């Protein structure tokens, strides 16, 4: 879930190509965010409503009701947040850095073109192993929509796949 803000922020970019600036074979979250920012597109400051909808939870070998219980517990949720002009001015890289604190994530693929994004991110989570997230969506200055699939091993539960959809939509000026 911590990845949602950085993906929403990256959605506003247009016509960018993935750039591995330090030639280490990976596109870091900061490199992807910097490339998105270089496109010149930024979200507008204001109050946003984010809606997260869990579409599928699949845990092979787990009791059937466990996946249903997780899907119902996570279900669909929404909340609002205010993005100030100061936060917008700090740029995507700062937003990415904040959302990834304590996580070791990098992109295997990060393509943004004409308001559409297609990416694949690998995160190593302490004590849980590796989690792969693929994402595809659209967005602009005031709205973004992202379909994500997370696959990995969850401590105590085994392999898991979760699909979700997030929507960020500007509601107006901050209160």
Image: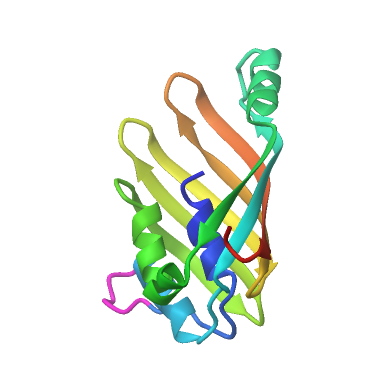
Name which residue lies at 62% across and 58% down: 48
Vertical side of 96 occupied by 81: above or below: above
Residue 68, how many percent across, how many down?
Answer: 71, 21
Residue 27 seen in render: no
Vertical side of 161 occupied by 67: above or below: above
Q: Which contiguous range is marked in magenta? A: 20-28
Residue 156, how many percent across, how many down?
Answer: 44, 19
Name which residue lies at 33% across and 69% down: 25
Q: From the viewer's perspective, is 40 left or right of 65?
A: left
Q: From the viewer's perspective, is 97 left or right of 148?
A: left
Q: From the viewer's perspective, is 73 left or right of 157?
A: right
Q: From the viewer's perspective, is 86 left or right of 40?
A: left
The chosen color scheme is rainbow
Task: Name the image quarter holding the C terminus.
Answer: bottom right
Q: Main secondary structure of the magenta part?
A: loop
Residue 128 seen in render: yes
- Residue farthest to the front? 175
Quarter of image, res 20: bottom left
Q: How many marks?
A: 0
Name which residue lies at 40% across and 62% down: 96
Residue 149, how many percent across, how many down?
Answer: 62, 47
Quarter of image, res 130: top left
Residue nearest the viewer, comparing 28 with 88: 88
Q: Is residue 24 located in the magenta-colored stretch of the structure? A: yes
Name which residue lies at 30% across and 36% down: 126
Q: Is residue 135 located in the magenta-colored stretch of the structure? A: no
Residue nearest the viewer, comparing 164 with 151: 164
Residue nearest the viewer, comparing 62 with 53: 53
Residue nearest the viewer, comparing 19 with 39: 39
Residue 36, how many percent across, how many down?
Answer: 48, 77
Quarter of image, res 62: top right
């Amino acid at each position: 879930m911590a990845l949602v803000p950085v993906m929403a922020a990256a959605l506003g970019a247009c016509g960018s190509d993935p750039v591995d600036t330090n030639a280490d074979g990976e596109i870091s979250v900061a490199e992807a965010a910097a490339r998105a920012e270089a496109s010149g597109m930024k979200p507008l400051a204001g109050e946003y409503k984010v809606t997260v909808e869990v579409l599928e939870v699949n845990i092979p070998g787990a009791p059937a009701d466990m996946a249903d219980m997780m899907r119902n517990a996570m279900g669909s949720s929404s909340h609002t947040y205010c993005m100030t002009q100061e936060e917008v001015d700090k740029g995507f890289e700062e937003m990415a850095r904040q959302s990834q604190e304590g996580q070791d994530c990098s992109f295997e693929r990060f393509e943004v073109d004409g308001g559409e994004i297609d990416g694949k991110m690998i995160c190593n989570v302490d004590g849980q192993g590796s989690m792969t997230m693929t994402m595809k969506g659209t967005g602009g200055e005031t709205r973004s929509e992202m379909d994500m699939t997370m696959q990995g091993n969850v401590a105590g539960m085994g392999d898991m796949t979760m699909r979700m959809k997030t929507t960020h939509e500007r509601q107006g000026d901050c209160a």
